[in-house]
Image: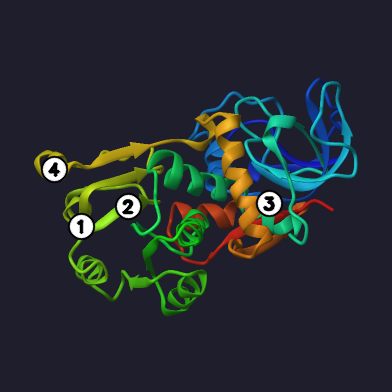
Amino acid sequence: MKAAFFDTTGTPDVIRVGDFPTPKPKEGEVLVRVTAASINPIDTYIRSGAAPMPLPKPAITGTDFAGVVEAVGPGVARFKPGDRVWGSNQGLLGRQGTCAEFVCVEEKWAYSTPDGTSDEQVACGALVGITAHLGLFHRANLTKGETVFVNGGTGGVGSMVVQMAKATGARVVCTVGSDEKAKLARDLGADWVVNYKTEDVAARVKEATAGLGINVWYETLPPGEFDKTIELMAARGRIVVMAGRAARPVLPNGPFYVKGLSLVGFAMFNMTAAEQQVCAADIGRWMKTGKLKTLVGARFSLAETAKAHELQEVNTLRKAGTLAGKIVIVPT
């Protein structure tokens, strides 16, 4: 099969595309013919060495996938050849990645693709959707009627947070960096959209909440300090962090505990398969009913995987602003 892989960590040009042994499903695994994969920031961190991971050598890049079950290993009960599936959690913790014509996946990390939903949509919504769901519901226990704030309402995770919060009956305030992205955020369902480049974010949040504050603050960016965040929180609010490995934010202890706030964090790949299956069930249901969609910002062939990494990297690390949505890799 053809695959995009690297022998050593480094810049995007360490990625090679060429022949690779087609895997065979072991006990509890399904062999998936990949029809769509997507690139996430974590893929670039793993490839660069910024997020050290146990990896096979050589290592195929890519975390997310969608496709068709080609074969199943012994003990597989939920899937059969011909089933459409999607998932994430590949390309890390010793597992081979998804930027290839085929990938072997443990049954517990694969989910049924809803009828009427494209492989591109579920592949692009995999990691970001599961991450958004874990933060909102597993960690922050969001409930109907609460108000959610998310930095970057049109980003990969941010766009999922907006839609999932709305599907649950919450109100959503989000930030964007342009008028074009503001329109996109409103189309996704955001109730209040703040252009952080031209507006006073704190003043707009206070206006949006009538001074009552935010119940769940979903921080998709590396936090620098929590003073402004805590000032804008409602009593017993929850702040979710899931980015910024090197961040050392200042936390004003007094206002934090007086308001009865909680600060919760998580990394998706440390959450159990059972916990993530709960997320996948909701994602599939919402996609099938049209309440959840993924934004596709760029498409690349398998041969262009290194270019896809470059695009992701300049937007994640250098804030180029040239990507709105997810990057799709089409293996065939």
Q: Is residue 276 left or right of residue 198?
A: right
**Could you tell me the amino acid type at mark 3?**
Ala
Q: Helix, strand, or loop for circle 2?
A: strand
Q: Could you tell whether 13 is left or right of 83 in the image?
A: left
Residue at horizontal 61%, vertical 57%? Answer: 286
Compute the Cα span from label 4 to label 3.
Answer: 40 Å
In the picture as drawn, the residue positioned furthest to the front comes out as: 144
Which residue in the protein does label 3 denote?
A: 123
Which one is in front, 48 or 225?
A: 225
Marks 2 & 1, CB-CB < 8 Å contact = yes
Q: Quadrant of residue 199?
A: bottom left
Q: Amino acid at mark 4?
A: Pro
Q: Which residue is mark 2?
A: 217
For the residue pair 167 and 49, the one nearer the viewer reads as 167
Closer to the camera: disc 4 or disc 1? Answer: 1
Callout 2 crowding tier (Cα within 10 Å): few <14, some 14–19, many ≥20: many
Q: Position of residue 156 (x, y in %)?
A: 52, 56
Assess whether mark 3 and mark 4 are in contact (beta carbons under 8 angstroms).
Answer: no
Q: Amino acid at mark 1?
A: Leu
SS state under label 4 = loop
The residue beneath circle 1 is 232
User: Looking at the image, is mark 4 or mark 3 earlier in the sequence?
Assistant: 3
Residue 46 image offset from top left, x and y in percent:
56, 36
Distance of label 2 from label 3 (alpha carbons): 26 Å
Q: Which residue is mark 4?
A: 252
Q: Residues within 10 Å of mark 3 (few under 14, many from 20)?
A: many
Q: Amino acid at mark 2?
A: Trp
Residue 168 visible in rendering:
yes
Vertical order, 211 against 248 (above or below): below
